[in-house]
Amino acid sequence: MKSIYKNIESSILKGEKLLAVLIDPDKMKLEQLSGFMLKLNQSVTTHVFIGGSRVNAQATDNLVKEVKKYTHLPIVLFPGDVNQISDQADALLYLSLISGRNPEYLIGKHVLAIPRLLEMDLEIIPTGYLLIDGGKKTAVESVTATKSLPQENTQDIINTAKAGEFLGMKLIYLEAGSGANIAVAPEIISSVKAYVDIPIIVGGGIRTKQQLDLAYKNGADLVVIGTAFEEDDSFFDELKK
């Protein structure tokens, strides 16, 4: 039974906060994975996200297979393109880049993915993806040929998130981008939380326990951290169970 989304909803009702560690197939060396996963399993991590903006063919599938050897946590695909789909994962964030206006990333890539998805037993979770300005140009902007939403334009971010909900998205993902200099501002998170009635994911630029707690305090239901662990996996020591 597909239950990852239901479990997210259930955790929110219980007041539990969720943490996903994002692993980029092009950055994680498989020979380093066992040590990384040992620390991950000892932490409060609840989900493993796998994906990146630019990923070599087969890299996603190979990484998912290896990750499954080391954890029973749900593995969720965070794909940047059609080639980043693996039937070895548990679920896929069906990302629509609603902050941009490039039709390829609003619906085009999704249509191309359908033949593969119909052959797989992945839980598909429709996700409204908002790229928020994190103080530097991200790989997402380069790949998708779209611009991020300025953080000072809170109302535009709120309206975009609410539009995603009205379109039937099950999650709203506020993303400052991989390696962002600035995380999504707490007031943006709290403002979006006040307007939407679906779970909110926040990622990009979170490198400290204080930033993590601040995101939770302001309404993030699930926080995604990737670069901070890539740069220094000792961060896991601050997040032990």
Image (cartoon, rainbow, N blue to C red):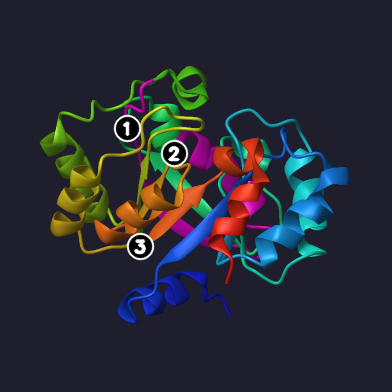
> How far apart in space, not on screen, are marks 2 and 1 (Cα)?
9 Å
At label 1, which amino acid type do we have?
Ile
Within the magenta stretch, is there residue 139?
no
- Give how far apart the Cα atoms at labels 2 and 3 are: 15 Å
Secondary structure type for disc 1:
loop
| Amino acid found under the numbered disc labelled 3 | Asp
Is residue 122 covered in magenta?
A: yes
Q: Residue at x 20, y 38 (%)?
A: 157
Is 127 left, or right, of 55 in this rendering?
left
Foreground mark, 2 or 1, reads 2
> Which residue is denoted by mark 3 in the rendering?
221
Q: Where is residue 198 in the image (x, y as percent from the top left)?
A: 28, 63
**Mark positioned earlier in the residue sequence (2 or 1):** 1
* First in residue order: circle 1 vs circle 3: 1
Answer whether residue 49 is visible to the viewer in this image.
no
Residue 173 lies, with reference to residue 125, above or below; the image says: above
First reached walking from the N terminus: tag 2 or tag 3: 2
Q: Name the residue under label 2.
A: 204
Q: Can residue 106 be seen in this view?
A: yes
Label 2: which secondary element: loop
Q: Residue at x 52, y 21 (%)?
A: 143
- Toward which corner of the image does residue 196 lie, by quadrant? bottom left
* The residue stretch that appears in magenta: 108-135
Is the residue under label 1 in contact with that under label 2 (CB below 8 Å)? yes
Location of mark 1 (residue)? 132
What is the secondary structure assignment of the residue under circle 3?
Answer: loop
Q: What x and y, as percent, mark residue 86?
A: 71, 51
**Amino acid type, callout 2:** Gly
Mark 2, residues whose alpha carbon is within 10 Å: few (<14), some, or many (≥20)? Answer: many
